[in-house]
Image: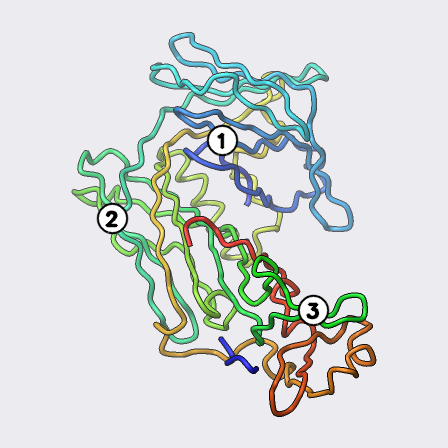
Amino acid sequence: MRFDLKILPVIIIVAFAMSCVKPFNPPAISSANLNMLVVDGLIIPGSASKIKLSRSLNITDTFKLIPEANAILFIEGSAGSSISFQTDTGGVYTSVSSFLPSDNQFRLRIKLQDGKEYLSDFVEVKKSPPIDSVEWEEKGDDINIYVNTHDPENQAKYYKWDFDETVEYHAVYDSFLDFVDGQIIFLEPDQYRYKCYKYYSSTNIAIGNSSALSEDIIRRGRVTTFPNDNSRIPYRYSINVKQFALTPEAYKYWQILQSNTEQSGNLFDPQPAQLRSNIHNVADPNEPVAGFFSISNITEKRIFIRFTQLVHRPGMPYADHCQERFIRPEQAAEFLTDGELKPAYFSMARGLAIAPAICVDCRLQGGTTEKPPYW
C-alpha cells in the first residue's frame, strides 16, 4: 500500500526570565581579551536562579568557553539582604532560595577561587507587561514576526525579545516498515519516523522602546525575520516570544551591540570598546567582563503557522532525491543491507518500494519524533 506524500551575542544579559536557561552564543573575543570572565544565567523572581561562569578562549578563530569552577556567588539587596548560590557541575551555580527580597535594587557579587572579586552595579527589578499579540507577515521571500505590547502603568518603556521556535516536518514517505537482521519488519506506533520536530532559539538582538511616546505602546516591534525556504515552515511552525523589560542603561548596551553586529553582519566579531558591562573587577575596573546584569520577569505568547497559510510554498527538501524504486521482497537483503536505502511501502501492484533512508526516517534530518507538550 502506498501512502500519499505529505508534505542563532552575544555578550550576556544576566537575568530576564521566569523560565528555562537558554544557550549562550557570545561574540568572538580579540586576543587582548582572552581568558575573560563570562557570566551567563538567570535571576528569576519567585523561582530558583541559575548562573553559569566560564572563561573565554579563542582557538583558531573558534570561540570556546571553559567553565569557571569553585566560585562563590551572592545576590545582594540594597537593604542588606543576600541570596547565596550552590555550585553545580560545569560552572553552573544555583540559588539556594527562590525568594527575591523586597529590596529596591540588587547586585551580583562573584568571588573566584583565585581571589578576584567582581561586583555588578545595583539594578532595579523591572516588570514586563503582558504581550498583547504576536503577528506574522509573508513579505517577498521572507517571513517577518512582530510583537505588540503596551504597559498601562507607563513604566516599562524599554523592551527586549527572545524566542524559541519549533518546526514540525515530515519524511517524504510515511513508512511503517524497517529492515532489521535481514528481515522486513513492521514498526510499532511509537517507532514511526514520519513526523519530526526541530527546535531553535533566538540568536539575533530584538529590542524596542516607547520612550519618545506619550504612551508606553509598542506596535509591530520586529522580533525576527527568516527566509521562506522550507527551513522553518515545511508543515507547521510555532514561535514562543519572550518579553523582558530593560533599564535605560541595559537598553543602551543592547542597542550598541545590535548596531555593531548589524554593521559587521556577524554576531561573532569582536565588540567595540564602548560596549561595557555593568559587572566589574573590584580591584581592576578596566578588566573586560562579558555580561550585563539585569532583572526582569518574563511574559510570553506563542503562535502557530501552517504551510497552507503561505502564499508561496517552497517544495519539500530532498524531494528530488527521493524517487522510490520497486523491488521484489525477496531482494530486500540485496538492496537494504548497507543502510543507505530503507523500505518505503508495499504496493500491491508493484512490490516493495525502497528509497534513500533520509526520505523514510525524518530523524536523519536532525529532529526528534517526540512531540512537544504544547503541540
The answer to whether 326 appears left or right of 254 in the picture is right
Q: Residue at x 41, y 71 (%)?
A: 307
- Give residue 42's mark: 1
* Vertical arrangement, residue 253 with respect to residue 279, above or below: below
The answer to whether 354 appears left or right of 173 in the picture is right
Q: Report which residue position mark 2 lands on.
A: 132
Q: Report which residue position mark 3 lands on.
A: 185
* Image-quadrant location for residue 185: bottom right
* Vertical arrangement, residue 50 with respect to residue 358, above or below: above
Front position in the image: 182 or 93 = 182
Outermost residue on the top side: it is 80
Q: Earlier in the sequence, mark 1 or mark 3?
A: 1
- Secondary structure type for disc 2: strand
What x and y, as percent, mark residue 141? Answer: 43, 75
The answer to whether 69 appears left or right of 310 in the picture is right
Q: Residue at x 50, y 23 (%)?
A: 120
